[in-house]
Image (spheres, grey):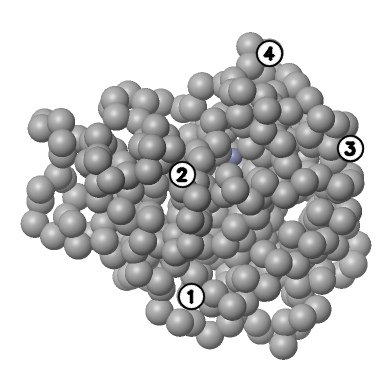
Amino acid sequence: MHRYMLGWTLCALVLLLAGCTPTPMAVPARVQPAAQEAVQAALTPAVPTTMPAAAATAVPTAAPAVLEPTAAPTTVPILPTIAPTAVPQYAEPDDTACQRTSGTTPLPAPGAPGAQDFFRSFRDPLAAAPLYNPPGTRRIGLQAGHWLTDQVPAELGRLQGGSSGGGKAEWQVNLDVSQRTAALLEADGFDVDVLPSTIPPRYQAHVFVALHADGDVSGAGRGFKIARPGFSSIPSVDDKLVDTLNNVYAAATGLPRDDEHITLRMRYYYAFNSRRYCHAVATGVPQAIVEMGYMTSGTDRQWLIGNPDRLARGLADGITAFLRILP
Ligand SMILES: [Zn+2]
């Protein structure tokens, strides 16, 4: 395969199958508009002349790097101490649009007819959608990032494994905080789904929040990051969700914001991308991704592992505050 084409394809794959990495990808100084940046990154050869240096270094050029789980930044053995219990069950939908984008449909081959249009289609915002806000008990989806990633369907087969630190894998922390947050919200009368890496096809809830914890091989990274889809179908609502979560989570935890390291991996998170993946959140559902802190920071681990209830309280209160401002 021609190296140019290989690199170009892998760039796109990396963006589409994003997850946490031990090394947060530095975002070019100009965060907005993210959509154009994502497409430029996806459509630019692996050794470009115009791609910002930070973005270029974050995109692997060797094929195995993309297909292997991300290396853990620590030598501490990872022992799965949290036994996953209730794995959500759902039926595959009878939905032709979903079927068309699901299963084993491969990404277009380099140079194939329509390949460029295929990847470019992720650049554009989704069509405006009505807010999903049915009456009755409010439903909240909390995704424990990387939980059961080894059980994803073929369309998500290249997901990364996540970070680690303090003797724990990221998914353990994500699941622990998700379950604590769910308990708080359920006590307040909400319905809550704690979801693994594979979310139900076209998932609908009054709000969906993916929970992750970051990694940084230097160990210097600190703080939290919150982002909404770069191609949101309800951008003003998603912005309110991000703003509310930022304010409440910061106040509850005291953790610093790390907005300058919000990545394309976050903005183009696979679970947001209902245009590409069947197992993605439906349009019209308020949605965001939270990097709760750095697994690789001893200080942040005092919250992530040492005081997860405080993080859960911040998330639950932030989600509740957002739901209150919905019409
Ligand atoms: Zn992650």
What is the distance, in whole Å, between disc 4 and disc 3 at their CAs?
A: 20 Å
**Above or below: residue 20 compared with residue 129:** above
What is the distance, in whole Å, between disc 1 and disc 4 at their CAs?
A: 41 Å
What is the distance, in whole Å, between disc 1 and disc 3 at their CAs?
A: 35 Å
Please provide percent x and percent y for residue 266.
53, 50
Q: Earlier in the sequence, mark 2 or mark 4?
A: 2
Which disc is residue 43 wearing? none
Location of mark 3 (residue): 307
Which corner quadrant of the image does residue 36 belong to?
A: bottom left
Q: Residue at x 79, y 62 (%)?
A: 247
Which disc is residue 18 wearing? 2
Q: Secondary structure at mark 1?
A: loop
Location of mark 1 (residue): 233
Location of mark 4 (residue): 76
Q: Is residue 220 visible?
A: yes
**Above or below: residue 163 compared with residue 110:** above
**What's the amino acid at mark 4?**
Val
Q: Residue at x 43, y 38 (%)?
A: 54
Please provide percent x and percent y for residue 311.
83, 47
Q: Earlier in the sequence, mark 1 or mark 4?
A: 4
Q: Secondary structure at mark 2?
A: loop
Query: Is residue 107 toward the left or the right of residue 179 in the image?
Result: left
